[in-house]
Amino acid sequence: MEGANPQILKMAAEIIHDQDRRATTTVCVTGASGYVASWLVKCLLNQGYIVHATVRDPENEAKVRHLLDIPRDEETLKLFRAELSEDGSFDAAVAGCAGVFHVASPTEFAPKDPENDVIKPAVEGTLNVLQSCTKAKTVKRVVVTSSAAAIAMKESEDQNQYMDESCWTDVDFVRTKMSNSSWAYTVSKTLAEQAALQYGKEHDLDVVTIIPVIVVGSSITPTIPISVQLALSLLTGIPSDLQVLKELQLPSGALSLVHVDDLCKAHIFLMENPSTEGRYICNATDIPVAQLAHYLSKRYPEYNVPTQFEDVPVISKLNPSSKKLVESGFSFKLGLDEIFDDAVKYLKMKGMLN
Ligand SMILES: NC(=O)c1ccc[n+]([C@@H]2O[C@H](COP(=O)([O-])OP(=O)(O)OC[C@H]3O[C@@H](n4cnc5c(N)ncnc54)[C@H](OP(=O)(O)O)[C@@H]3O)[C@@H](O)[C@H]2O)c1
């Protein structure tokens, strides 16, 4: 191509190379019917990957239709049945994959039997998935989705101005002192992440973990994700959701938010960058509830947003920091405006907002 800009030609060649590489790369996503994982499947298919998606019941049309409706080449998405509590359940889905995104985890906040409904399946399920990776012998990297719940809960706050990847939730403290019903989820995410990193070390499996804060934005799931409902509770006015939102800011003094699209791109970034290692906090922005209320009342004056909050801190204390992720080369594309504009549009589409 005579006269063409060599820089642009080089970039075009790199893009074609990336597309070719991805088109021959098969990855597995666990818990694919869920909020984060279904968006991740959409991003991966969009980028040309071949995806093995695990769901609990591939025959349940209502739980998988949103996955089957993702525009794609016919052969690029395959659904597999897998259950966290069953040994060997992930073997078939992981076989032949170069990468595995382990996203599935029980997300029930008020389980009847916390140990057996949440903690055990999260921890043993993670080990199950990792054992399938070892058996497969093709897996080069596993990205495990943890949670800010795994870094934020402890008795003392004698730390710096931010929480980084050295912070771990104190499981004994949570088990004995945390009074709200989400304690089991907090314990499950902490123990599952620790088990994943330990397994990686002991079995020479390349495991990195990603630690999302509250995930907001749009969704392709048939039901509205809980994290979106909570984050939008200042607009929907649902008192129980608003109460939980206020509780969510207690550990750090602020709500930490990330757009689902940025979170999924960060998962893929970690999969594609072999030099990354260990844990990565994924947090786009922090804002205390009281400030968020003022922001939302200005941005969406059509809703009756309460702005008086004497019962919550007005300044943030310890924010989860994404410095490590950003210094590794990842950049967040979506801030508070996009997070809420997309979520509001989505809730309007679902009829939850006028
Ligand atoms: N959303 C957030 O704000 C947020 C924040 C931090 C971390 N995270 C983490 O991100 C991941 C995804 O969360 P999400 O918000 O997308 O939640 P979600 O929509 O509830 O998705 C959870 C997924 O895990 C699957 N799952 C649960 N128990 C299972 C089991 N026993 N066997 C097999 N699959 C099972 C669910 O399957 P079914 O559909 O069949 O129930 C679902 O597909 C989780 O690891 C969560 O801890 C989320």
Image (cartoon, rainbow, N blue to C red):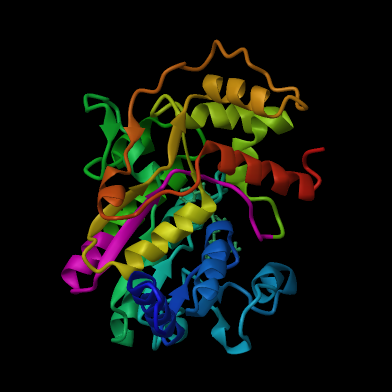
Q: Point out residue 64 in the picture as x, y percentages from the top left corner.
A: 67, 72
Q: Which residues are magenta?
A: 196-221
Quarter placement of the C terminus: top right
- Taking the spot 29% from the left edge, 38% from the top edge, the residue there is 170
The answer to which quarter of the image holds residue 69 is bottom right
**Is 147 on the left or on the right of 350, as rendered?**
left
- Taking the spot 44% from the left edge, 80% from the top edge, the residue there is 19
Relative to 293, residue 259 above or below? below
Relative to 282, residue 269 above or below? below
Q: Is residue 36 magenta?
A: no
| Viewer-nearest residue: 18 or 291 | 18
| Viewer-nearest residue: 281 or 2 | 2
Q: Point out residue 172 in the picture as x, y percentages from the top left corner.
A: 30, 38
- Taking the spot 57% from the left edge, 37% from the top edge, the residue there is 337
The answer to which quarter of the image holds residue 250 is top left
**How many numbered circles are shown?**
0
Q: Point out residue 150 in the picture as x, y percentages from the top left corner.
A: 35, 45
- Taking the spot 33% from the left edge, 70% from the top edge, the residue there is 7
Relative to 62, residue 248 above or below? above
Residue 59 visible: yes
Quarter placement of the N terminus: bottom left
